[in-house]
Amino acid sequence: MTEKIIDAKFKRCFVVDRSLSCEDEGANNEEKSAHLLYFHPQNTEVEEKIRHVSLCLGLVDFSKTFDDSETCETVEMTDEIWVIRNPEPDIWYVMVVALPRRENGTSSSSSSSQNAKSKRPRGRRNVKKEERKGEALTGSLEPAVLHSVLKDMHEAFVLFHGSIREAIHPDGNTTETDVISRTRKKLRKAIKIRDGLENDHITSTPERLDKAREIPVLKEKLEKIVRSSRLTKVRSRMRSALSAYLRSVCFERLHLFESIRGFNFLPVNRITYLSTQYFVNLLRDKFSDSVLSVTFL
């Protein structure tokens, strides 16, 4: 019997703005995903994105029923771990990583699997589904490490692009996103009326006909607002910056040094480096509310 260790594997990461959540039960997928700022892998179907986000945020809300002052930050399952961070008001980061696994392989198991494949009925469609075989090594991946990755990812984005909250709602102004939400809702209802008229499910009236004729105008208006909106710019920046950051993280080799940001070596002697580090720590401690980062050149 041979034993093989399968490394941890990144599964998904997403960022949502809960202030943009749509509570309308009749909302379409576009409205339901309006609060989604970033999702990786980017080629994930919209329905699947909504399902993952709804499950995670529902779990966060459920955990608050026990203690409203505490927020669920880590969810450890049998085969994966979720880490959740709320670095800004209504801005939530979520990362899901599959745990390392121990796989015991034998020649008999491989032959039996081949026999099972040969006995598969013909004509049956094979559904491609990712499977990670073997025993999950629970406790092998520290949540603090993944929290550090999320923290660094957010701080790197803020360093180059500023606060996400302020970028979407500068000075608390929600006018732009409110207009987008109302226009989407109005367009959805107009399309529903048009479909009802075409299928003779509702009675034709002048008012309903006028609403159905508004569809092209509403579509053009919505497309124009969304294209030039601050929300679209934030999503574009996140796709570029966060995707680049995730590509730089080796999830197969994460360790506790990530949680303390490793060791920083500089081409200076030890005393100079320690004096500089001491000065940085003093600055961050004294001006903790205003200092985001310190750089010595």
Image (tube, rainbow, N blue to C red):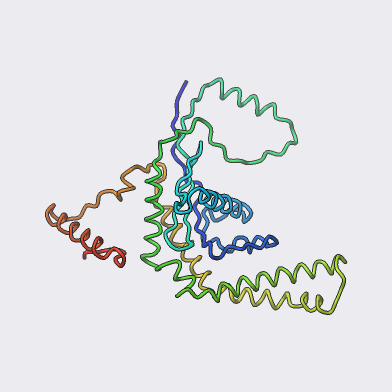
Q: On the picture, is 125 further left or further right than 20?
A: right
Q: On the picture, is 275 further left or further right than 28?
A: left
Q: Residue at x 44, y 38 (%)?
A: 7
Q: On the picture, is 269 further left or further right than 178?
A: left
Does residue 32 lie above or below 145 as drawn?
below
Q: Which residue is drawn at 49% across and 62% down?
A: 90
Query: x, y percentage for residue 68?
Result: 48, 53
Question: Looking at the rendering, which quadrant does residue 139 occupy?
Answer: top left
- In front of the other: 174 or 6: 174
Query: x, y percentage for residue 76?
Result: 48, 41
Does residue 264 lie above or below 131 as drawn?
below
Query: x, y percentage for residue 207?
Result: 81, 78
- In front of the other: 6 or 81: 81
Count the labels in the image.
0
Query: x, y percentage for residue 124?
Result: 73, 36
Question: Looking at the rendering, which quadrant does residue 255 occupy?
Answer: top left
Question: Looking at the rendering, which quadrant does residue 46 occupy?
Answer: bottom right
**Quarter in which the C terminus is drawn:** bottom left
Q: Which residue is drawn at 45% across and 26% down?
A: 3
Q: On the picture, is 167 further left or further right than 225?
A: left
Q: Which residue is drawn at 45% across and 67% down?
A: 165
